[in-house]
Each structure stands twice: as C-alpha cells, then as structure tokens.
Image (cartoon, rainbow, N blue to C red):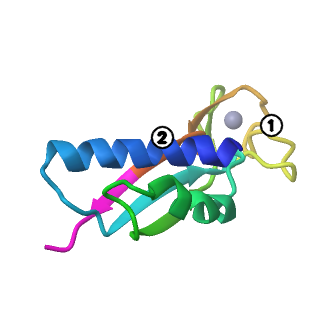
Amino acid sequence: MHELSYMIKMVNLAEDTAIENDIEHIDKIVVEVGAMTGVLPYYLHKYYPEATKGTRLEGSELEVIEIPVKAICNNCQTEYEPTKENDYRCPHCTSTSSHIVAGRDVTLKNILVNE
Ligand SMILES: [Zn+2]
C-alpha cells in the first residue's frame, strides 16, 4: 500500500492546486518517481482511478516518469548511479562515501489542463 499513500498525496497536491487556481478539471498529471523509493509505476496507474474518484482529477490521465538514482562521490565529486553492479561505489575512486542527489522522491512534476 506504499504506492497508494504516495498516490493520495499526489492527488491531494494536484487537487489543492486546482482549487487555488480555480481549475474545474485537471486533464493530466505528471509524477516523477525516483528509483530509490521502491514505488512501482504499475501500482500508481492501478490506484489512480480510485485515488482520483470524486476529485477534480477524476477521469484524468496519469503519466509516470522514472528517475534513476544519482549520487555524488564525497571524495572526488564524481556523479554516478549507484547500483549492485558497481557495489554502490564511486566508479572513479571506489569510495563508498557519497550523497544521493536524485531518485529518492515521488514528486508532482506537472499539471495539465485543457481549456
Ligand atoms: Zn569518487
């Protein structure tokens, strides 16, 4: 139910934006899903009709964009994608000390409205 709680959060966010901006109906939302969140786009799509029922998003389209994980090495500042293949180490200096800069969030990227 991980996905459903994210979905409800995104729908509430879009709904609030619609109310604030006097938008009667949203036609499409774009959601970015970081690889690190473990959220599966399949389930987002599956829960979408239920999550949008009775809201200004009912009947709208959902687009999910998957964002790969991006880390920056604390030792040499190389930007890389930590994976099992590289043992989550920096490919340049093999340091394991890094900070994640992308791929750990689910965010509402865009709201589309047909006038
Ligand atoms: Zn490095």
Q: Quadrant of ligand 1?
A: top right
* Highlighted range, magenta: 109-115
Q: CA distance from mark 1 to mark 2?
A: 38 Å
Residue 50 locus on image (x, y percent): 55, 58
Disc 1 vs disc 2: Cβ atoms closer than 8 Å? Answer: no
The residue shown at (23%, 67%) is 113
> Compared with residue 32, is residue 114 higher up or lower down, i.e. above or below?
below
Residue drawn at the location 87% of the way across and 43% of the way down: 87
Q: Which residue occupies 65% across, 48% down? A: 3
Label 2 CB-ligand 1 distance < 8 A: no
Closer mark to the observer between disc 1 and disc 2:
2
- Judge: label 1 CB < 8 Å from ligand 1: yes
Q: Secondary structure at mark 1?
A: loop
Residue with the mark numbered 1 = 94
The tag earlier along the polypeptide, 1 or 2, is 2
Q: Position of residue 43 (x, y in %)?
A: 67, 60
The residue that appears at 48% across and 40% down in the rendered structure is 9
Answer left or right for 21 relative to 99.
left
Q: Is residue 74 visible?
A: yes
Estimate how packed mark 2 is, as few (under 14), some (14 to 19) or many (20 or more) residues with alpha carbons within 10 Å. Answer: some
Please name the residue that numbered disc 2 is placed on. 9
**Residue 81 x %, y %:** 68, 49
Kind of element beneath mark 2: helix
Residue 3 belongs to the span the image colors magenta: no
In this picture, residue 74 sits left or right of residue 20:
right
Determine which quarter of the picture holds residue 24: bottom left
- Badge 1 crowding class, 10 Å Cα cut-off, few under 14, some 14 to 19, many 20 or more, is some
Which one is in front, 81 or 94? 81
82 lies above or below 29:
above
Callout 2 amino acid: Lys
| Amino acid type at image mark 1 | Thr
